[in-house]
Amino acid sequence: MFDIKTAIAGAGFMGPAHTEALRRIGVTVTGILGVDPEESLKAADRLGLPKAYKDFKEMLNDVEVEVIHLTTPNKLHFSMAREALKAGKHVLCEKPLAMTAKESGELVQIVRETGLKAGVNYNMRFYPLCLQAREMVIQGTVGTLHSITGSYVQDWLLFPTDYNWRVLASEGGAVRAVGDIGTHWMDLVQHISGLRISEVFADLHTVHPVRKRPKGEVETFSGRITDDRATDDIRIDTEDCGSVLLHFDNGARGNLWVSQATAGRKNCLKFELAGEKKSVFWNSESPNEIWLGDRMQANAILMKDPSLLSDPVRPYAGYPGGHNEGYPDTFKQCFTSFYSDIAGKQPALPPLYATFEQGHHEIVLCEAILESHRTGKWVKISESY
């Protein structure tokens, strides 16, 4: 239970997900803000929240609110996070943190100046077996890493009649599949391995250079638009899929495949760490088991069971062995880490949740990947604030 009050900006796919997770950890949600007062009222009524904010200024002026969660479209993250921090509010922002590295770098500076807590919801970190993989690396069980490979694929933009604001660079950012899901993978493998991506070489591809825009807006993952609703032809300036070769700062090699047009894959992240002692493979579609590979003895499958996990990981497994944990639980554990930090009870230093600095690093990676794609060259990662 946290004696902290929070407000949610954004009433789409992520707003309710944040609300539900916050309630599970005992954080009071004062209210929610939609795109207009009408949507705010509908969302507050549907979620049983006491307040429907008419605008962001009203939310910032609410003296009860100590923390603001941003689940709005990407292009609003920078301005809303900046305003919230300057109003003295802690901020938990959906990814990406901003549209450009210049913007995210400015946010990092504001956090440093204010001393406020600020996190990015890279929730994939908080699957218990991802945390276990990280602990195995820390303890030396895997050994020096030689390579990190994997993918993150979905199918919700497979058809040319699939449309959402995310496909537009002006709304979601210049890179889409990489920025939307690729950053989850890159954040996760860097968090687990303790390594940093130092250089990238990218080849991106737009499967549908023209898409059909429907009469009304389409919520993320809501399903395919039928032909009779699709109207305008819209030229697409973001990628549907792509491949990125990676160099890590210890000399390890890697590669990442991302796609939002792979039929049948609804939301599938995979990674494989290859070390001098052991390999580790995990698939988000089977999140309660992890494959451990050996050269001189039998391979093994570790099932999610608190009694089998390392001591630092055990608190982040909420249910006994045989009781599966999934996507909503990662939000709960991410927010537990964030609010523990606010309350001065953070058990891990640095914290396990992604900070604004790490969110900024992901934007820097995205810009380097786009530059590499456009120039056909390796691009070194240069941090800037």
Image (cartoon, helix red, strand yellow):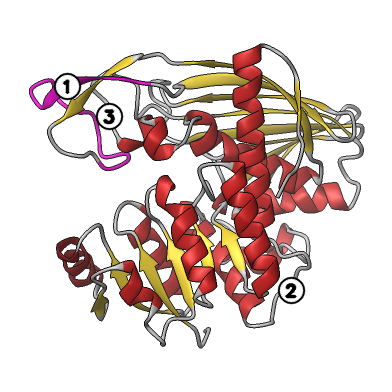
Which one is nearer the viewer's eye here, 331 or 171?
A: 171
Indicate which disc residue 163 carries.
3
Instruction: Tell me where residue 301 sits by quadrant.
Output: top right
Q: Tags 3 and 1 in contact by the CB under 8 Å rule?
A: no
- Amino acid on which the number 1 mark rests in the picture: Asp
Numbered disc in front, either 2 or 3? 3
Please tell me whether the stretch drawn in magenta is mainly helix, strand or loop: loop
Q: Residue at x 84, y 47 (%)?
A: 137
Indicate which disc residue 232 carries.
1
- The reply to whether residue 288 is visible in this rendering is no
The magenta stretch is 219-236
Mark 3 or mark 1, which has the lower sequence index? 3
Judge whether 375 appears above or below 124 on screen. above
Which one is nearer the viewer's eye here, 101 or 216?
A: 101
Residue 207 lies, in percent from the top left, at 40, 13
> For numbered disc 3, what is the local secondary structure?
loop
Tag 2 residue: 347
| Local crowd size for mark 3, using a 10 Å CA cut-off: few (<14), some (14–19), many (≥20) | many
Q: Tags 1 and 2 in contact by the CB under 8 Å rule?
A: no
> For numbered disc 2, what is the local secondary structure?
loop
Which one is nearer the viewer's eye here, 367 or 299?
A: 367
In the rendered image, residue 229 lying in the magenta stretch gets the answer yes
Cα distance between the residues tagged 3 and 1: 11 Å
> For numbered disc 1, what is the local secondary structure?
strand
